[in-house]
Image: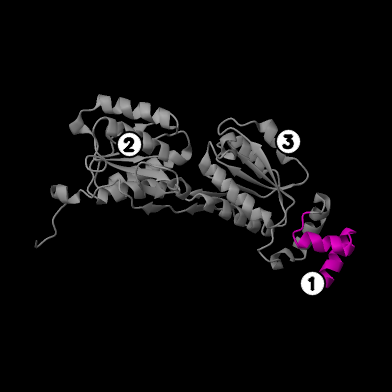
Amino acid sequence: MTGKLKIRQIAELTGLSPSTVSRVLAGKANVSPQAKEKVFTHARNMGILRDIPASRLLMNTLLICAPPAAFSPHEDLYYYEAIQEITAEVSRFDIHVRKCALTVNDPDIAGFMQALSQSDVDGIIIIGIDDVMLYRLAAESNKPVVMINAKDSEMRLDCVSADHYSIGYSAAHYLFQKGHRPVLLFTDLRRETMMQRLDGFKRACLEHHIAFDEATHLLINKGNGKEQARESIDKYLREHKRETLPSAIVCGSTPIAHATLEALTAMGIRVPEDISLMSMDFAHEMKTATPMNFTSMLLPCRELGTEAVYILQSRLMRATSAKFNLLLQGKIHSGQSVADVKWKRKGLYPQPVGL
């Protein structure tokens, strides 16, 4: 059956004009939600949606739900950049973007439901929200939903996240290979993603035959800001003698890394000669003014937005296919804040037989 015959047949079944059916299947936005639903229903039954190019995103309005700070470039820049990428991706399809600000924990469920129930909302992207009830309501909306940096324990929603477990593992592994013992993880633990990084850090300790001890290997920051981090690291340094300080510190964010560098410098501790520092951030953060070119574990950022849109496209075409979690890898940026001290610690490493 040719394309024109398919359009004519759907028009007869729906009572819509062939031009309206054509606009729906072309992904145009100037079509009512009711018309789109009629066309999609028959197109799915006829197997037509499988033949539509994946480059089309058949939606009127996309709802983006995220913490309030994610919508400001002066607050949560990481999520802000991901949202900018989503907006850029969907702008190619003449799709309207609607935003809904929700707190990370205990979000406004009534506000979410009001935004979700708008008739022109055809898809939802949820960013950085931890709430089981919200996930359940989103899954029951019968609209395609993709989550960023979150995980649905009931496995009903598609998710795309940085592979935080591997990121925590790889950061610690990198420092252990450089000969650093002990290594301190300085991070906040407000979200499940941070706990996953901690689990990866612990796994690296295990593989390098290091018994993880919370008092030795973990410093928890109360938040993600620079001021709180400076208070935490100052207190830590006051309570530890110079000879008991770690060989290297993995900082959970750029603000934490900056605060740590300032605190160490104030005490006359050199980086990386005395203590090495490793940051976790993303490529955009690397462009900001910094007193040091940090060795960093770079997190995927804008890539999250790109992949979320592609997943949404797939879900619109294959509504009943299996849900999945897409994990994006990070990568190491070699800067000037980590020293290679393995040569100083040869006694820690078994010598090859015959040498």
Q: Amino acid at mark 3?
A: Gln
* Magenta segment includes 292: no
First along the sequence among labels 3 and 1: 1
Task: Name the residue located 23 percent from the left edge and 34 percent from the top edge.
Answer: 245
The dominant secondary structure in magenta is: helix
Picture mark count: 3
Position of residue 218 in the picture relative to residue 240 (left or right): right
As helix, strand or loop, the secondary structure at mark 3 comes to helix
Residue linked to disc 1:
3
Labelled disc at residue 134:
none
- Alpha-carbon neighbours of circle 1 within 10 Å: few (<14), some, or many (≥20)? few
Q: Amino acid at mark 2?
A: Leu
Residue 240 position in % (x across, y down): 24, 27
Quadrant location, the N terminus: bottom right
Labelled disc at residue 261:
2
* Magenta segment includes 7: yes
Asked whether 149 or 132 is in front, the reply is: 149
Per the rendered image, the range of residues in magenta is 1-29
Position of residue 209 in the picture relative to residue 350 (left or right): right
Quadrant location, the C terminus: bottom left
As helix, strand or loop, the secondary structure at mark 2 comes to helix
As helix, strand or loop, the secondary structure at mark 1 comes to helix
Residue linked to disc 3:
114
Q: Amino acid at mark 1?
A: Gly
